[in-house]
Amino acid sequence: MTVGYLTNLANLLNSPSDEYSPLDGRHLIYQKVKRLVSMATGIDSSGNSGYEANIMADIPASQKVIAEWPAPIILSGFEIGVNILTGIGLINNKAIENSPVKDAYSISLTYDGSTVGHSSWDQTAVLVAVKGITPYFNSRQLNFTIKNDGKDSVMSGQRITYLIAKEKPEEMSKIIEGLMMHRPNR
């Protein structure tokens, strides 16, 4: 599971063996990683690809990870999380105190002036990494290439599992926000 840019994962792919492991990064991934789940890329309603911030932040790293990752990949695209708005219920919940998640949302939503919440791009990937694709999303198999300008393009192949919206965004917002408000047992 990763959120944000793919730089560290590309660095892991390039890493040699060292004093901590006799395996280089690629072999370590092959041996230790069951799957990579990430919010990256995007497909519009016409089925066309485009530009996405996590890809654009480090295009060479994104190209490397998407092309060479030696374990299965599940991607949650931009279009999945953009309409799943979370945070308002969390920051309005008086019972939750001393929460870094609540604090981050409070600062972010106040800064943005949002009264509806923040798009939950990374949270969709976290949800799938922890709970699985079903019952939250459908999926399809495809492959991507990342162009030198950062545009992600769908290409033939079935190497990547790509999430497809199943539930209404409002329902997904409730599910994700409910998990963010979960208080661990002491």
Image (cartoon, rainbow, N blue to C red):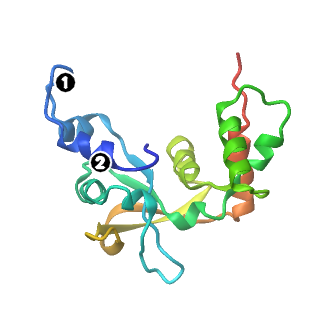
Q: Which residue is mark 1?
A: 21
Label 1 Cα crowd, 10 Å radius (few <14 / some 14-19 / many 20+)? few
Figure quadrant of residue 29: top left
Q: Which mark is residue 96?
A: none
Total marks placed: 2
Q: Earlier in the sequence, mark 2 or mark 1?
A: 1
Residue that lies at the very extreme toward the top in this rendered image: 186
* Residue 87 screen position, x and y as percent: 72, 48
At x 42% / y 74%, what residue is drawn? Answer: 50
Q: Label 1 near label 2: C-beta < 8 Å?
A: no
Residue 134 in sight in this render: yes
At x 72% / y 55%, what residue is drawn? Answer: 117
Residue that lies at the very extreme toward the bottom in this rendered image: 46
The amino acid pointed to by label 1 is Ser
Residue 175 in sight in this render: no
Label 2 Cα crowd, 10 Å radius (few <14 / some 14-19 / many 20+)? some
Figure quadrant of residue 62: bottom left
Residue that lies at the very extreme toward the right in this rendered image: 94
At x 22% / y 54%, what residue is drawn? Answer: 68
At x 66% / y 64%, what residue is drawn? Answer: 83
Look at the picture and state if 157 lies above or below 106. Answer: below
* Residue 57 screen position, x and y as percent: 38, 56
Q: Nearer the viewer, mark 2 or mark 1?
A: 1
The amino acid pointed to by label 2 is Ala
Going by the image, does 20 lie left or right of 132?
left
How many angstroms separate mark 2 from mark 1 (CA)? 19 Å
Going by the image, does 164 lie left or right of 116?
left
Quarter of the image with the C terminus in it: top right
Q: Nearer the viewer, residue 136 or 54?
A: 54
Q: Which residue is mark 2?
A: 71
* Residue 4 screen position, x and y as percent: 45, 49
Q: Which secondary structure, mark 2? A: loop
